[in-house]
Image: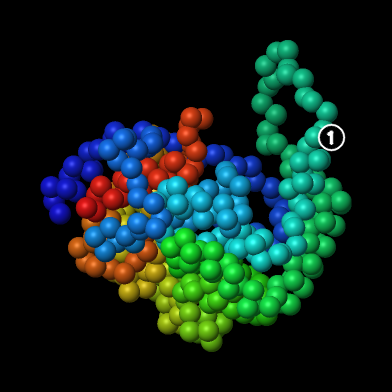
Amino acid sequence: MESKLNSFQTRRAFLGTSAAIAGVSMLPSGLSSCSGPTAQSVAPTANQGSKFSGVQIGAITYSWRDQPSGLEDVVRYCREAGINSIELMCEPLEEFLGAPKNPTWDLIRKLMEQQPPVAPPQTPSPPQGPRPVMEIPQEIKDAISKYNEDVRGWRLSLDISKVASAKKLLDDAGIDAHIVKFSPGSWDAELIDYAYKVTKAMGAKGVSDEIGEEAVKNMAPIAEKHGMYAIFHNHMQFGEDPNFSYDPFIAVSDAVRFNFDIGHYFGSTGKNPVDMIKKYHDKIFSIHIKDKTGPTAESPNSNQVWGQGETNLAEILLTLKEEKYPIYADIELEYDIKPWSDSVREVRTCVQYARNILI
């Protein structure tokens, strides 16, 4: 392990690039979160697989958020990036199944188009303090409320047998969805049950959400009922609270598992993610792979092109290989993408980067 590990720790030759996305303070409930390969380094197609030396490399479909987001699009991105394993965000799946269209973004776009252009100041303006939060027009509030009612009714009346067509689309392309991220931790029991029924019909092993007491308490009993997992993703909790631990969540239910984000962990703590992986390997269902700077860097806790940050990607991947941990390793593309590239090309390059470490 040592010689290969050292060669990748010093590697900084993978140039590359994530599209920044604008956030809105009020959204409908249930919405979620290296230059191209050389001629000699072409990632395999999805049908060839992205499991290298026993380590399953995949991607969370959030990585392609700058692209059209239909389920058929996801299949195409997997093929182009050489991915055969995904953490599937629920939006493309529900859209494929016929969910009501979310009108929010169209309304916001219309609102922005109606705003008069702002002329640039003739002289530099003095600091004005924090920007005021934009008031959400009543039209948008009403649309969100109606959408939430409509989508709830649609979810609870969905014929689960219809999910078979979505599963077949992935199966025919050789793609496995091991998680569906519905983020239902704040939903009521009926809706959480819906999320598990759909996820089970997709052949996935669990539903994911952001980690928190409410989400664990609400999701774990329903995961148990379905013989599945409630899987929880971390952000900066380990860095923000020195007492934060997985242990209280594990104590709630044996159905609790973790989607361990190594980038958020390292970026906020500076600690080696391998130590956490070894300690909780039987409770970590998947990891999110990304490269970040640590908390003491000049630009702390910032996303970097793979190989240009400080995260020990090679050690992490080689640990999964050597220890034979059955942990899914999913690319979560978050670094800035250059204008000459796109997220599909970047994910493909990350697949190749991981493959070069593992083989």
Residue 281 rendering spot, x and y as whole percentages = 31, 70
Q: Decide which of 353, 131 is in the foreground and name it.
A: 353
Work out whether residue 256 can be spotted: yes
The amino acid sitting under disc 1 is: Gln
* Residue linked to disc 1: 114
Q: Is residue 255 placed above or below 137 in the rendered structure?
A: below
Q: Residue furthest bottom?
A: 225
Residue appearing at x 86%, y 51% in the figure: 139
Q: Is residue 261 left or right of residue 89?
A: left
Q: Is residue 145 left or right of residue 124?
A: right
Q: Quadrant of residue 238?
A: bottom left
Residue appearing at x 64%, y 74% in the figure: 162
Work out whether residue 263 can be spotted: no
Q: Decide which of 107, 73 is in the foreground and name it.
A: 73
Residue appearing at x 32%, y 74% in the figure: 282
Q: Is residue 273 left or right of residue 60?
A: left
What quarter of the picture does the N terminus occupy? bottom left
Residue 32 rendering spot, x and y as whole percentages = 60, 58
Residue 297 rendering spot, x and y as whole percentages = 36, 38
SS state under label 1: helix
Q: Is residue 112 placed above or below 332 in the rendered structure?
A: above
Q: Is residue 240 placed above or below 66 in the rendered structure?
A: below
Residue appearing at x 51%, y 55% in the figure: 75
Q: Is residue 349 left or right of residue 92?
A: left
Residue 63 rendering spot, x and y as whole percentages = 50, 49
